[in-house]
Image (tube, grey):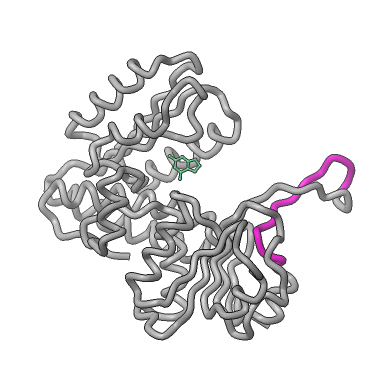
């Protein structure tokens, strides 16, 4: 049976470190880290995410601001707000919640955020730094950065000699995850919907990361004995056994079957999910520390 990786506990460790470093920063007379979260429109799932980000920021001792804009906000108005936040010395991190309403060009909006305040790690400058191994100065997207901390807790920081398979090639998770694993000396393969014989490829993995957004797609017998399995998926599926109309959350991995083979595995919920928000706090602290001339905190 696999060890269950407790993402909730590791996330609490990260947040505790953020809280301590924030207190040191402010005790030295510097500004508290400032996080601005921007949401456009009324997507209920986005509102839940944004509220939990703002709440966690306050818990960390941050200056936390939320801008809620109407769904019909023009691109010009949104870009103007981002320009103001870029210029505001009290703000160290800017997050524009995605998805944006269709009339707004998300790519253009993201590239307008100052790279040194891009705590999502989506700006081309940060993508390029990660891709060229400049991990000391890059902002790395929160979900893969959090997943990497979980992998390090199991395998240590140097992953030399290990084969990693990342299933999914998104810009937000799959590609940055592959770059992080490569920077840690893994031999990395990115698999996707057009990959031939995905089960056989997954069986070559010492580290298997599933980030496809398809409920329980990765089967138990795709998992190499002893592999570290990181399940990034959060999928809501019907759960008639809990009553009519009820649902439950599952990952991209068939957890029960995979835990028979894996050495360690993340559950859903309680695995990667809590790490994403913890790393947003960590990235905001990094930005504020660098602005204050402090060394970059590590996690
Ligand atoms: N929507 C869902 N996840 C994310 C995220 O990590 N960052 C942003 N900006 N929007 C999201």
Whether 43 is among the magenta residues is no
Left or right: 95 as drawn, with respect to 48 = left
**Above or below, 144 relative to 157:** above
State whether residue 189 appears in this view.
yes
Q: Quadrant of the C terminus?
A: bottom left
Left or right: 2 as drawn, with respect to 242 = left
Left or right: 152 as drawn, with respect to 183 = right
Left or right: 235 as drawn, with respect to 92 = right
Whether 245 is among the magenta residues is yes
Q: Report which quarter residue 84 is drawn in.
A: top left
Q: Residue at x 43, y 57 (%)?
A: 175
**Above or below, 188 relative to 75:** below
- Residue nearer the viewer, 86 or 53: 86
Where is residue 225? Give x, y as percent: 63, 85
Q: Quadrant of the N terminus?
A: bottom right
Where is residue 76? Give x, y as percent: 33, 16
State whether residue 64 appears in this view.
no
Q: Residue at x 46, y 24 (%)?
A: 40
How many numbered badges does the structure rendering display?
Answer: 0
- The region drawn magenta spans 243-255
Q: Report which quarter residue 73 is drawn in.
A: top left
Where is residue 146? Give x, y as percent: 43, 60
Where is residue 260? Give x, y as percent: 71, 80
**Above or below, 51 relative to 24:** above
Q: Residue at x 48, y 57 (%)?
A: 174
Q: Residue at x 60, y 30 (%)?
A: 44
**Above or below, 283 relative to 180:** above
SS assignment for the magenta stretch, majority:
loop
């Amino acid at each position: 049976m696999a060890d269950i990786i407790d993402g909730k506990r590791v996330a609490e460790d990260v947040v505790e470190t953020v809280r301590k470093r924030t207190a040191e920063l402010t005790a030295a007379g510097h500004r508290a880290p400032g996080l601005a979260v921007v949401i456009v429109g009324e997507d209920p799932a986005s509102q839940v995410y944004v509220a939990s980000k703002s709440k966690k920021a306050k818990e960390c001792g941050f200056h936390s601001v939320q801008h809620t804009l109407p769904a019909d906000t023009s691109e010009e108005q949104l870009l103007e707000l981002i320009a103001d936040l870029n210029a505001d010395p009290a703000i160290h991190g800017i997050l524009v919640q995605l998805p944006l309403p269709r009339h707004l060009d998300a790519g253009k909006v993201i590239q307008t955020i100052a790279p040194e305040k891009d705590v999502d790690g989506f700006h081309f400058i940060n993508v390029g730094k990660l891709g060229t191994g400049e991990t000391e100065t890059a902002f790395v997207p929160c979900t893969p950065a959090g997943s990497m901390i979980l992998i390090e807790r199991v395998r240590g920081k140097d992953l030399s000699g290990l084969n990693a398979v990342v299933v999914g090639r998104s810009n937000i998770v799959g590609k940055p995850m592959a770059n992080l694993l490569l920077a840690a000396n893994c031999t990395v393969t990115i698999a996707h919907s057009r990959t031939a014989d995905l089960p056989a490829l997954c069986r070559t993995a010492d580290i298997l990361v599933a980030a496809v957004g398809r409920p329980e797609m990765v089967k138990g017998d795709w998992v190499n004995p002893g592999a570290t399995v990181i399940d990034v998926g959060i999928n809501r599926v019907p759960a008639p056994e809990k009553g009519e109309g009820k649902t439950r959350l599952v990952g991209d991995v068939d957890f029960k079957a995979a835990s028979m083979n894996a050495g360690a595995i993340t559950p859903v919920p309680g695995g990667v999910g809590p790490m994403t928000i913890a790393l947003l706090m960590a990235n905001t602290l990094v930005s504020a520390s660098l602005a204050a001339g402090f060394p970059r905190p590590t996690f």
